[in-house]
Image (cartoon, rainbow, N blue to C red):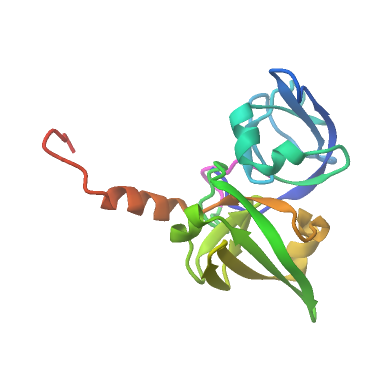
Amino acid sequence: MFTGLVERTGVVKQVTGESSGLFTLVVDPGPDFERDHGASVAVNGVCLSEVGHQQQGDLTFHVSHETLSKTSLQKAKPGMRVNLERSMRPTDRLGGHIVLGHVDGTGTITTIRKEESFYFVEILIPKTLSPYVVSKGSIAIDGTSLTINTLRDDDSGTHLSFMLIPVTWDTTRFADVQINDKVNIEVDMIAKHLERLSLPWKTTNSKL
């Protein structure tokens, strides 16, 4: 589990196996990014297991075809910056919101503009995710916990607007994104559970 508070950005060093059965992603996280073999790390909001055997240096991940098909990691290239967050410890404060690293789909950056010291960003998400977002609700964009300022529905999907403070812009990969870039979307887990609970299930044989 993660909080959506990005610890730092890393740089993709190597991408291999695009045409084979094993897609491997190597990321340089910078100095002093400690982890253990098998540790969970959110890379642009995607929960991946670190398969290397060193506590310092590059991070190595094996990425499944399912993950590639559902996330923007399929576009990962050497030199690209990615958001990194290690999994939450039981003693940590939940400063953002509950983020699982299970991406629900991708959205598209449609607007970026600077407004005084802040940055206005608008993202279009598909209609399939529209029921799970509300104004002033939480959402994870490339693993970054953000508050939705406003939303607007049309035939293309739902347009979400955000006002990013300077520290968020400077310490995440948002400073690198451009119009039409794809970003990973994870909607609020509670909204998905509530939808599931509201379905008219037959409970005759239920033991709950």
Tell me if I can see residue 40 in this picture: no
The residue depicted at 62 percent of the width and 35 percent of the height is: 69
Whether residue 99 is situated above or below residue 145 in the rendered picture:
above
Please identify the residue farthest to the left as the structure is shown: 204
> Is 97 left or right of 22, judged from the image as shown?
left
Say which quarter of the image contains residue 169: bottom right
Which is nearer the eye, 114 or 199?
A: 199
Tell me if I can see residue 166 in this picture: yes
Whether residue 99 is situated above or below residue 74 in the rendered picture:
below
The residue depicted at 76 percent of the width and 49 percent of the height is: 8
| Residue 145 locus on image (x, y percent) | 60, 58
The residue depicted at 69 percent of the width and 43 percent of the height is: 72
Q: Point out the stretch of residues depicted in magenta.
A: 85-92
The residue depicted at 51 percent of the width and 51 percent of the height is: 98
Whether residue 23 is situated above or below residue 71 in the rendered picture:
above
Which is nearer the eye, 39 or 45?
A: 45
